[in-house]
Structures are given as structure tokens and as C-alpha cells.
Amino acid sequence: MFKKILIANRGEIALRIVRTCKEMGIKTVAVYSTADRESLHVRFADEAVCIGPPSSAESYLSIPKIMAAVEITNADAVHPGYGFLAENADFAEVCAEYGIKFIGPSPSMIRRMGDKITAKETMIAAGVPVIPGSEGALTSVDQALELAKGIGYPVILKATAGGGGKGMRVVWEPSELEANFDMAQQEAKASFANDILYMEKYIEEPRHIEIQIAGDQDGKVCHLSERDCSIQRRHQKLIEESPSPFMTKALRKKMGEAAIKAGEAIKYEGVGTVEFLVDKHRNFYFMEMNTRIQVEHTVTEEVIDFDLIKEQIKIAAGIPISGKNYEPTMHAIECRINAEDIWNDFRPNPGLIKSFHSAKGHGVRVDTHVYAGYTVSPYYDSMIAKLICRAQTREECITKMERALDEFIIEGVKTTVPFHKLVMKNEKFRKGDFHTGFLNDFDYKAEMNEKDK
Ligand code: MV4
């Protein structure tokens, strides 16, 4: 087992990793920028190294600075968390060159799944259902028009280096294709320095359901059930839950088997997520694979009572997985508490947290690096806490979440707490009747009483 893990991240996930390492008897090294001196991940780690100024490029994204911190602290492994360098194949490669274990899959695996056309080709070869579309890259507008005729409108143009919605355009009719092709190409070039596009049939009103998998160094792969992440705003997830209210036993079996097939075909090592789009007929299609631990891993942990960070570390140390698949026996929902002004387009609202009374009680989990007196920096992601509730049924879980949101008092910065209260009251949400377009149709401003504003 590793003796000392350096955590190349910040915020709640860095603290989350410190906690598991402590429970496993592994020493921890935190790295931090000057903006994060007062963060709890720094306080609770065994050692901490300042790696630079607030800008991510000069701190959490700087491979030389992270490697220097590894060297001076003698860490034998690096946990990348999510975001920052978590899916950076070059970083995983540098770790390997230095003889440091990168807790995650190999550089080639990260690269393979990071390129969406290659990922899709890999899944087709593995027999995993994918969305009908172009075979590989689009070569011209004329070719795209020909292909779209065969696929049938609407179609969607996606960037092979994309993910998370950038460089993506829906095309409803042939006359709109050329302009959208140019825009998608330009956006992709500017965002990823790669303008290669591919095309798919556009699935209307889909659900985003993802399967958590784990694979070990012997090539054994298991699934740990699904998460429903359909409640998103501009490709930022806001609420996740497990099980999905749309799931059936039969669909879980089929999607679980597909996700395992995907993992086995690539000999996936580590924990990962296979993202699917699910249409209203419960047809499911591979969308992307994430080769990192995700923000929403907590809902899975709650419903199957399992520490996914511990599993990551064990797999990286060469310990085989049990191979058992997991079914949720409870229900969990996560609300992301962001320092954002929901009345102003969810604009980040950094600043001093004057008071912070966390929700508590049975079935309530709060993962956070902040506290009263903490200053939320404008330099990073605005998520300041994850509120996760767990109960026997979905209905009880929503009731518990409403109770927990009511007692979660944060003063000094505006947060998404009032927004979550409105979603919990929404009839469609309560019935589990939603898809990825839910927030486009949800007029939360109209639903809020004057006095609550
Ligand atoms: C799609 C789609 C419909 N049809 N692909 C959004 C981000 C990127 N991961 C892929 N996305 C989508 N791909 C086809 N063929 C709809 C979306 C999509 C979406 C997906 C998941 C969660 C929220 C979403 C919001 C808008 C669009």
C-alpha cells in the first residue's frame, strides 16, 4: 500500500480524499495556492505545500509545480480528484516517468476516452449501443449534408475533443447546417485547438443516466449502479440522484452489462463512469466515458454504502476488486450548493462567508471545505458544499432534503439553496418526470413567493 499520497486538487474533493487516506493509514500531502491557505484540505492534511499564486494555470494546473511538491515530500502516489489534471494524459505520463503512481487509468486510456470519436469507435467494437451518426470525422459541409439526409433531422454536431457541451450544435433542417457547422468548428478550435467534428442523430428530451464502474489490474470489471444527472443547467449538473426514478430492474441489468462490456473491452483500471443518454422508450446509448472520480460519486456511496475513494486507492495499489455488482437498496439525492446569484443568471458570488450553519441529522451528509469566516475565491469553481440526503424511499429522501435545505443557513454569499428548495417542491421533479431539458422549462422565478426572495 502507498505510504504517502499527494492530492493534486483543492476544495471539498481534496478534503474528501484526505479523510479516506486517514482511515487507511496513509499520509497525505495537500498542495495549495496562496488563495487557499485557509482551506480545510490544507488544515487536515499531514503536510501542505504552497504551489503558487491563485490562478489555476500557475498552481493546480502546473505539472512542474505539482511534481516539485511530490519530490520534496517523497509522496509515492498522486490523487488528481476531479477537474484540473484529473483527465490530463500528459500529467499521468509524467507521474509514470517519475515512478509515482497516478491514481487513475493509464495515459493511453485517458487519451482514448478523451477523444470522443475514438471513444465511440471503441464502444462500437465492444458491442455497446451508440447513437446513430457519422462513422468518424466529418470532412466537409457537403459530406455532412449527405450524412444528415441519411440519419434524418434533427442532428447534432459535436467536437471530438469536446464533452460538456462545448462545440456542440443542434441542426433542425438542411438550411441551417452550414452555419452551425462553421460555428461548431470555430468554437472547437478556440476551446480545444482541435476542430474535428462528428455527427449524431439528435435525441430529444433524453435523460442523462450514468453507470459507475470499477475495474482492477487483472481486467475484472463490476458496476455500482446508476446516477441520474438530468437536472443540469448549461451542462453544469445541479442535482444528482441514485437510483434513477426512470430505472427499472431490467434496464439496470442491461445498462450495467453494457457498462461492464465497455470497461472489459478496454481493460479499464480504476473507477470510472460510463455516461448514457436514455430516450423516452428506455433505449440507451453510450455518450462519453469519464476516467475520473466525479463530483456526484457521493450518491452512489450513500445508496450502496461503499467508499469509492478507498476503492480507487486499493485498485491503484494492485488489490483485486470483489467483482460483485451492486444494486441500490436506498435512495440518495445530492444538491450542489454553489456561491451563485440565482436571480442574476447564476453568476458566481464569491466573498466572505459570515455564517455557516450546516444541515445535520440522520441521513444527511455535507461534504465541504468551507466554514464561517472562509472567503470564497473568485478564481475557482463556485461549488462550496455538497448536500447529500439518504432515505429508504425517494419520497422520504425529498422530504429530508427539504428539511435539510431549510436548516442550511449561509450568510455573506448568495447560494443555490433557495433554488434547490423550489426544485424539491416542483410536481414534475417529485414525480420523477424530468429529462435534461427540465431547467429550460422550469420557471423558478415565477414559482418563488415574493416574501422568500
Ligand atoms: C446529445 C444530446 C442529444 N442527442 N447527443 C450534452 C453534453 C455532452 N456530454 C453531450 N450532450 C448531449 N448530447 C445527442 N445525439 C443531448 C445532449 C445534452 C445533454 C446531455 C446530458 C445532460 C444534459 C444535456 C443538456 C443538453 C444537451
Image: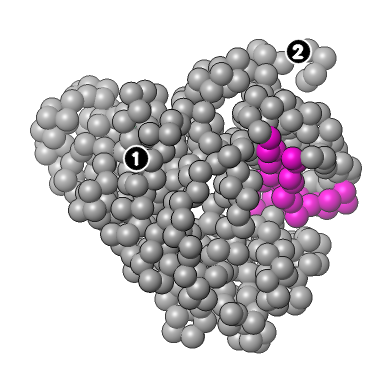
Per the image, label 2 sits on a secondary structure element best described as: loop
> Above or below — where is 361 with respect to 96?
above
Q: Is residue 195 magenta?
A: no
Residue 44, percent across and down?
A: 79, 67
Residue 422, percent across and down?
A: 68, 22
Quarter of the figure with residue 185: top left
Depth order, front residue of 397/320: 320
Q: Is residue 77 visible?
A: yes
Give the label, 2 or 1, closer to the camera: 1
Colour convention: one colour
Instruction: Assess disc 1: are there few (<14), some (14-19) or many (≥20) residues with their C-alpha within 10 Å of its C-alpha.
Output: few
Mark 2 and mark 1 lie on one chain; the one further toward the N terminus is 1
Residue linked to disc 1: 254
Q: Is residue 440 visible?
A: no
Depth order, front residue of 452/397: 397
Residue plotted at (72% across, 31% down): 401
Quarter of the figure with residue 444: top right
Residue plotted at (60% across, 15% down): 427
User: Which kind of residue does numbered mark 1 sit on?
Assistant: Lys
Q: Is residue 128 left or right of residue 63?
A: left
Extent of the magenta region? 363-391
Depth order, front residue of 156/260: 260
Instruction: Assess disc 2: are there few (<14), some (14-19) or many (≥20) residues with their C-alpha within 10 Å of its C-alpha.
Output: few
Residue 19, percent across and down?
A: 72, 63
Residue linked to disc 2: 449
Residue plotted at (68% across, 71% down): 24
Cβ–Cβ below 8 Å for labels 2 and 1?
Answer: no
Residue plotted at (51% across, 28% down): 245
